[in-house]
Image (tube, helix red, strand yellow):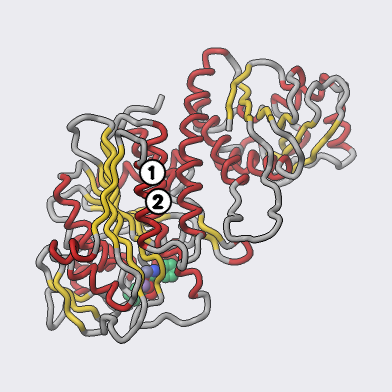
Amino acid sequence: MEYFTTTSKPSRRAVDCVIVGVYNRGKLGAGAIDIDKASKGEIRRLIKSGDVSSQAGRCAMLTGLPGVKSSRVAVVGLGKSGAFDAKQFRRAVATATQAISRTKAKQVLNSLTLEPVSGASPYYLARHSVEATGEVLYRFTKMKSGRKKAASPLNKIGLSILKKGDAARSMLGATHGDGIVAGASLARDLGNLPANVCTPAYLARTAKNLAMGNGKLSTRVLNETEMKRLGMGSLLSVTAGTREPAKLIVMQYKGAGSDKPVVLVGKGVTFDAGGISLKPGLGMDEMKFDMCGAASVIGTMAAVARMKLPINLNVVVPAVENLPSGTATKPGDIVKSMSGQTIEVLNTDAEGRLILCDALTYSRRFKPAAIIDVATLTGACVIALGAHRTAVMSNDDALRSELLTAGDNAEDRAWPMPLGDDYAEQLKSNFADMANIGGPGAGAVTAACFLGKFTDGMKWAHMDIAGTAWKSGAKKGASGRPVPLLTEMLLARSGALP
Ligand code: BES
Ligand code: MN
Ligand code: ZN
């Protein structure tokens, strides 16, 4: 995708489509005022006739407007003018892009960036534009045979700015948005691939390929023998029931000399059948998404490397498949983690924490400035927060609010949940140092408390993305979340935000 900024009037620009907006009660956005004037009142006339709607989610595609150089004008509903915030802005861009993607338009000029949007600078408006467009244009057709529906030919996005002085920041927003789209699209691809393709070895190969020809990025992959030598008995207990070899993927990006790195750890269960504690059949296919934590941290690494951020970032992905078989771990089995702590596996379906704890212990060698694990960890989190927000638990108040703020700015929202000894007590075992489940109450919190037993002395946060990583139903597919949140956090840390 190519990007440009312009201060010229939308009606004066010879592109394939301009995007303008109208608010409720016949209030025109800045671009619509210009198009209306140039066309001698066409927009107002079409609002009166009911052919143009101001409702959010609606878009009218007008062609051949007199006095307008663009061959198409997409008029999108912006809803109430007082309520036009970053979220509504993204929705409007998405709605227009949806309509445009059904045409042959190659270059569009988005004039919605001229609107006053509460709390959003030209930088963020450019970024939101590019991200919303990328989200809509994303297609997953790799696994379809035969003639595939042609992808939209859209390849150039223009962003209207009020003054020349906004050009640099707007372009920076577009560039960062482009990196986030690339990272989130990679995460979505990995998530959407079926488990018979996206195996632990496939994730490892993807991570290796990303490092190819990038001097700042390197990838190492540890096999089961190496993990055994390190004492990762907890991680290895999860892979005991499958023939698919487990991998520990370690990526290192050096963009800032000898600074301590941020370490991202992503749950990479390429399929979670539950093991001997087998899951029910209905909807089990969705457990191919149980590696979306891994996908999101690899996607974030791809975004960071593409933007060449001046920061040090490590990614650690424990990748396994969780299946039942004659060699699988059984409920009641006791395993020894790399930390030395023993774990009674009361439920083999609580496997995410069993692989993450060893990945967290392994990550100590990097002396992280902060360590953040990302995981589709608990069904309980879906019950608590639904699909809207990612849960964040942390042993460090500053790190927690850093992540929540990043989520707000990136429109990829998160919400705090507690940790605490009271909850951690639910993990007591009669036979080992701890059990891997904490009973029926507060499942998302006790899962986080379990991980907390392996992060002593590190600034650590846990993100449960069980509700946000993918959509179910007719629009089933990976969301790419929380790549925008994580990338925003790293942009802020590296001082790259204007
Ligand atoms: N991958 C699942 C969590 C999950 C379930 C995510 C549904 C999204 C939708 C995880 O491995 C799991 O099975 N967790 C169990 C834990 C329980 C046994 C304590 C769960 O949430 O039921
Ligand atoms: Mn499970
Ligand atoms: Zn799982």
Q: For residue 399, say whether it is visible.
A: no
| Image position of 284 (left or right of 363) | right
Q: Amino acid at mark 1?
A: Leu
Q: Are marks 1 and 2 in contact (CB under 8 Å)?
A: yes
In this view, 362 is above or below 19: below
One can see residue 211 in this view = yes
The picture quadrant where one finds residue 305 is: top left
Instruction: Pick the residue in front: 306 or 370.
Output: 306
Residue 147 lies left or right of residue 359; in this view the side is right
User: Which residue bears the numbered disc 2?
Assistant: 206
Residue 472 is situated, as x and y percent measured from the top left of the image, at 55, 65
With respect to residue 415, does 9 lie above or below?
above
| Residue wearing tag 1 | 210
Relative image position of residue 283 (x, y in whole percent): 52, 75
Identify the residue at image location x=75%, y=17%: 12
Q: Quadrant of the N terminus?
A: top right
The part of the image, by quadrant, that contains residue 311 is top left
Some atom of ligand 3 lies within 8 Å of the CB belonging to the residue at label 1: no
Front-most of residues 455 and 52: 455
Q: Is residue 132 left or right of residue 325?
A: right
Q: Quadrant of ligand 3?
A: bottom left
SS category of the residue bearing label 2: helix
Residue positioned 72% across, 29% down in the render: 18
Residue toward you, 197 or 477: 197
Above/below status of 103 relative to 345: above
Q: Amino acid at mark 2?
A: Thr
